[in-house]
Image (spheres, coloured by chain):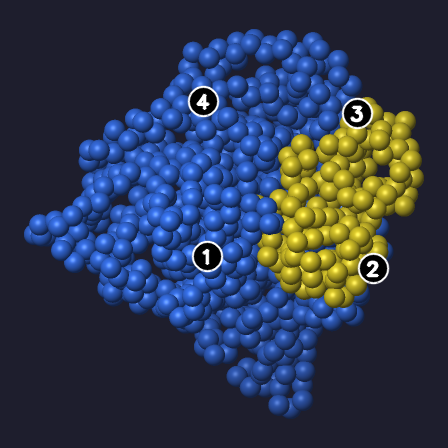
Chain colours: A yellow, B blue
Amino acid sequence: MITLKVNGQTREVDADPQTPLLWVLRDDLGLTGTKYGCGIAQCGACTVHLDGAPIRSCSFPVAAAAGKSVTTIEGLQSKAAKAVQKAWVALDVVQCGYCQSGQIMSAVALLEQKPKPSDADIDGAMAGNICRCATYQRIRAAIHAAAREA
Amino acid sequence: MRMLDTLQQTHLRQTLAETTPAPALSRRDFLKSGAAAGLVVAVPLGWSGAALADPAGQPGVLAADAFIRVAPDDTVTIMIKHHEMGQGATTGLATIAADELDADWSRVVAEYAPSDPKLYANLAMGIQGTGGSTAMANSWEQMRKAGATARAMLVQAAADSWKVPAAEIRTANGVLTHASGKRARYGEMAGAAAQLTPPTNVPLKDPSQFTLIGKDRKGRLDSLAKSTGTATYTIDVKLPGLLTAVIARPPAFGARLKSFDASAARQVKGVTDVVQVPEGVAVVATGMWPALQGRKALKLDWDLAGVDARSSAQLFAEYRELAKRPGVPASKPEAAASAAAPAARSIEAVYEFPFLAHAAMEPMNCVAWLHDGRLETYSGHQLQTTDQMNAAKAAGLPPEKVTLHTLVSGGSFGRRANAEADFVVEAVHVAKAIGSRAPVRVQRTREDDMQAGYYRPLYVHGVRLDLDAQGLPAAWQHTIVGQSIVAGTPFAMMIKDGVDPTSVEGAAELPYAIPNHALTLHSTKVGLPVLWWRSVGSTHTAYVVETLIDEIAEAAGRDPVELRLALLKDRPRHVAALRLAADKAGWGQRKPAAGVARGVALHESFNTVVAQIVDVRLVDGQPKVERVVVGVDCGTAINPDVIRAQMEGGVGFALAAALYGAIDLEQGAARQSNFNDYQVLRMPAMPKVEVHIVPSAAAPTGVGEPGVPPLAPAVANALYRLTGQRVRSLPFARQSLSVAAQATT
Ligand code: FES
Ligand code: FES
């Protein structure tokens, strides 16, 4: 049994310790907001926060998350997070939407680190999140909008 | 927080209140914030089996036809017959119907239609399906009529109840009013309206009366669910006892399984079954990780005798030879030869385009559930009718025993519109192979998705252009070589006189007045499956035509925009789109910054004309596109902001392929397997995109694909100005480019 703290709740999971956190979240805990896109830390669809920092959960063994605090899109609560989601909706960022949980998790982590990011900061923080629908222009605008709001 | 339901309830309708994690972001937050004014309140992005055609047992609900339902609580449900893959069809179709209905947009809910071609066929296809950027065009009249009919019934119900003439009743925002002061919400009249016989031939609005169509507003119906992680994709489907399977697939196209040893795989904790299916060996497990571990533990022996071992490089060499001689005539008959003027000079050009993967963000997947003599599937079903037929055949059931649940998908770009329904059929095979014991999701990994095929075909074009003494075209002889996309599929009837139109569209008929234009086609056979890829033939034809037009301009000493305008005869939409983009970009007015070159391209696809003007810089030998100005004529702009989004996305998608896109075939397999070696666009490479829409009252045309074709040739035309090099093979990343001593910027 591995004990995790996910979205503020303590959860016990019976999983192979090497299982990527992504599959524990999705298959064992039913938290399907976090997506699978590549499995090799290339696309960012699986981004969650571990003690507040963004990680690629597809490439992060669940055992390494034991005792740490995991936040998924379902558990976003901070002021920055609300500002980000509000901006995402206000600007109609999404298209297929499949990458957007990961985009939002990266954007929230960025704003929590850097409340007023520059375009270069956004490039740096978001380059690991692929959007095949290429919603990047709106993602950038929404991050700036959220920064003004938060 | 309320989790998405378990989902025996196939009629799941996720209202906002249900799906939004309350502590994070509630509907009240949204409404209070004002940021969301006018936003949608309910977002059913799950599946629906509830056919509007069968509203039995729902008292007080007006179901005017198969598309609209008005409930006593004022909710207006609009049935969406098209697949939502990000293109905005949900919002578009709902907008059309809601406008004629005079609905309160904040009470509009979308639901995805069940598979029923009698009710929900794509009128441009004759089957139920989405593709060819047809969703708005084929639904325009249909959804307007649906909205107008429902409105007429509500009005009649109010007229009967108030004893006033129907003509005196006004409607707006979901409310009926009469000068006498009488007033009712739609929901209050829905029950009475449901008793009436739907009228026929209800008049439609004059466009000047539109309140939603053409208005520049935000409010995609799927924004909130997709911004909160609550939209249900195929990968998220939950069913009782649902199992997950991955398939060990052939290492090369055409390889066959000789034997396999699953003893180690069966030892993996969580693996429930290892079964042979036509697609390979499926490892079925309680979750994705054990399935993957089980697959790793398989020992597989493959027979490679049937593999077509030609590499991409060999195919290019063969195709280049073929391109030297004419194939099957493929140009439009009106382009017949006229008396040829003697050529003052000629341009001979050979172009090469590699295989491309769609690489939609959600790797292909489908859930299949065989139970009680029926099959249910859950997937991003883009071609419902052929998916249903294929699934029925694979299950050994009649089609009426197959229920499709069409979910939103994490992108398609053509990949999910596969008449062979590969990702559906394999799920049915696995469900059958485990004895129909449980529902099963076959989930592809990214590697499976990229390597199991269906690519944009590899093409070579050979062109000989004869120019007259002024440098203007006197003859254009063009040969295209590549696999047919539709041959051997149910769409093969599209082939006419030996020509697959998807191989030549965009080059068969030029918008420019060019004498002696002749196009021919060689359709090749290669042992790997190919498919349409966002904008199909125009992915390569636009590149060839639009870069050659720039070469003609250079030969004639003319400005590329001016020359295009001069050659466009009786093409007012092309002229308007090009002029708009050129004006907004400051073409010929404002010089680009030092080190930046500007390029232009113009292309019509799917009845939509798009002009793009790009600003390009060379950074470390590679193009960096800084700005793209788009002029688009797509008829009536139903949702201008969705059109802008599709143009932005089309530009980014096209730029990814132009910069990096290539699947290399080697020994019958794709060498690339994931985003590490099949590079796609990332945030830092995204240009600023400005979209300008040509005002039009004509019927709407598509926008999902037409933003793609002009981008690559526009960049190539700018690159020539920077480097003096004419790039004739894609992607750019494989060319060695350097700034010319005398850059013509
Ligand atoms: S799925 Fe984890 S980075 Fe792509
Ligand atoms: S919205 Fe489709 S991948 Fe980002």
Which amino acid does the dot numbered 2 rest on?
A: Lys
Image location (x, y in percent) of residue B447: 59, 29
The answer to whether the residues at label 3 and label 2 have Cβ atoms under 8 Å apart is no
Residue occupying the point 86% across, 43% down: A51
Q: From mark 3 to mark 2, how far is it between C-alphas? A: 34 Å
Residue found at the very far bottom of the displayed protein: B180
N-terminal label among 4 and 1:
1
Q: Nearer the viewer, mark 2 or mark 1?
A: 1
From mark 4 to mark 1, how far is it between C-alphas? Answer: 38 Å
- Say left or right for B535 vs A138: left
Query: Circles 2 and 1: CB distance less than 8 Å?
Result: no
Nearer to me, B555 or B8: B555
Marks 4 and 3, how far apart in space?
33 Å
Residues packed near mark 4 inside 10 Å, few (<14), some (14 to 19) or many (20 plus): some
Considering only order in the chain, which callout, 2 or 3, is on the residue closer to the N terminus?
A: 3
Residue at image mark 4: B666
Instruction: Say whether residue B516 is visible.
Output: no
**Circle 3: residue type:** Gln
Label 1 to label 3, Cα distance in Å?
50 Å
How far apart are the alpha carbons under marks 2 and 1? 41 Å
In the picture, which quadrant includes the C terminus of chain B? bottom left
Q: Position of residue B263 (x, y in %)?
A: 69, 9
Labels 2 and 1 in the same subunit: no
Q: Which residue is mark 3?
A: A18
Q: Is residue B264 above or below residue B559?
A: above
Tell me the element at label 4. Answer: strand
Q: Secondary structure at mark 1?
A: strand
Amino acid on which disc 4 is placed? Glu
Q: Chain of mark 2?
A: A
